[in-house]
Amino acid sequence: MKNSGIYKIENKLNGKMYVGLTNNIDRRWGEHRKNLRQGKHVNTHLQSAVDKYGIENFTFDIIEQCCVSDLVKRELYWIEYHNTNDNRFGYNIERKTPYPTSNAKKESTREYVKIYQIDKDNQIVKVWNSVKEVSEFYNISQEIFSKKLYGRKLDSDRIRKRWKEFVWVSENKYDSTFDYFEKMTWEPGTRFTVSRVKKGLYFVINPLGEIIQKLDVSEGASYFNTTEGAFMKASCVDEVWKGIKVIRESDYNEAKDYSFSLLTPKYTKVLYKIQNTITQEIVEISNISQAARDLGIKLGKLLMLLKGERKENGKVRVVTRYKEWIKIPL
């Protein structure tokens, strides 16, 4: 039995209705009620009506059940049939205005830019007619979905790459020659997500640059007692991991020197040696807060001293600062 189709939400007091589509009929009404009760529904006309008349005066009915591929076409048919784009008869947001303002033009452009849904094989699996179509299908606002598009900046270190295991690209930014999944390497400060790199072998390389193991993802995770994601992440950065390097078979270059030193510039903390100017005693500190209490000086003044903003504090001076190096075992 199909669980996708077209539905209507009808106002029992005035007969106005909202027509929508869903790929999960059983769940959709509950989602609408939740958003309407919280005042967060994406359709402002429907939200205002529920606020005015009360949600108990609205009914949810199935108009037609159909395949997912026919949802948009059938929704447009029933919207036109019931004329719910006209605010005298319904709550569907009008898509066109005869004299749009600058804001309306911007909104209209955003709605009607086609969206390409790309799978892990870099193939377009579906072309959506607009941002609105996708946002209604997944029951999120257009603003939220727009932030899911490929290349959107998330913060200073991260950009949006995938959402729901697909890449989403607007038509005007789509490049058919670009491999959206192959280019998704891990970047510092980002959360690593598994792409199609699960396939193939991974070479485990020792400090001499020699291949000592050839493992697939599951074997590598089991061998190093870690997760598959962590093992694949190790292959995406050219750094020492657990005393070895992990290189994907497809990325391996026989002409390249993969040797590395067991001493890496990774360290866990900075140590300081300070001298008491009264007793001339030199002590090593790693816990700055505890040192401030032991020396009887304010933490802020000690921090200024350690950062080099002040040379001496009357009681103490910094003799040296150095990093603690860690030797990574094989």
Image (tube, rainbow, N blue to C red):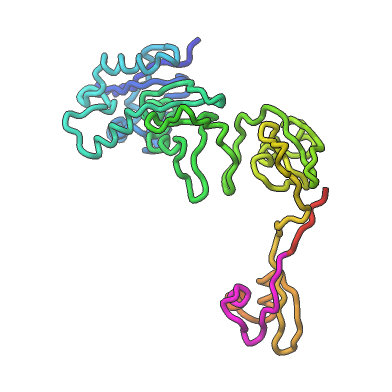
Residue projecting furthest to the bottom: 278
Of residue 32 and residue 103, the one placed in the foreground of this image is 103
Q: Position of residue 1 (x, y in %)?
A: 50, 10
Indicate yes or no whether the magenta region holds residue 114.
no
Query: Which range of residues does the magenta coloring cover?
Result: 304-323
Q: Residue at x 36, y 22 (%)?
A: 20
Above or below residue 281? Residue 162 is: above
Q: Is residue 13 left or right of residue 5?
A: left
Q: Residue furthest top?
A: 1
Q: Is residue 220 visible?
A: yes
Q: Is residue 239 above or below residue 162?
A: below
Instruction: Name the residue: 77% across, 52% down.
Output: 261
In the displayed structure image, the side of residue 80 where residue 164 appears, left or right: right
Q: Position of residue 330 (x, y in %)?
A: 83, 48
Image position of 248 with respect to 4: above or below: below
Residue 54 visible in the current orientation: no
The image quarter in which residue 173 lies: top left
Residue at point 39%, 15% (across, down): 62
Magenta span includes 306: yes
Extreme-front residue of the structure:
255
Q: Position of residue 235 (x, y in %)?
A: 68, 39
In this rendered view, identify the residue nearer to me: 99 or 318. Answer: 318
Side of 83 where 238 appears, left or right: right
The correct choice, above or below, for 288 with respect to 98 in the image is below
Q: Position of residue 295 (x, y in %)?
A: 69, 81
Q: Nearest the camera: 121 or 152? A: 121
Instruction: Report the number of numbered marks.
Output: 0
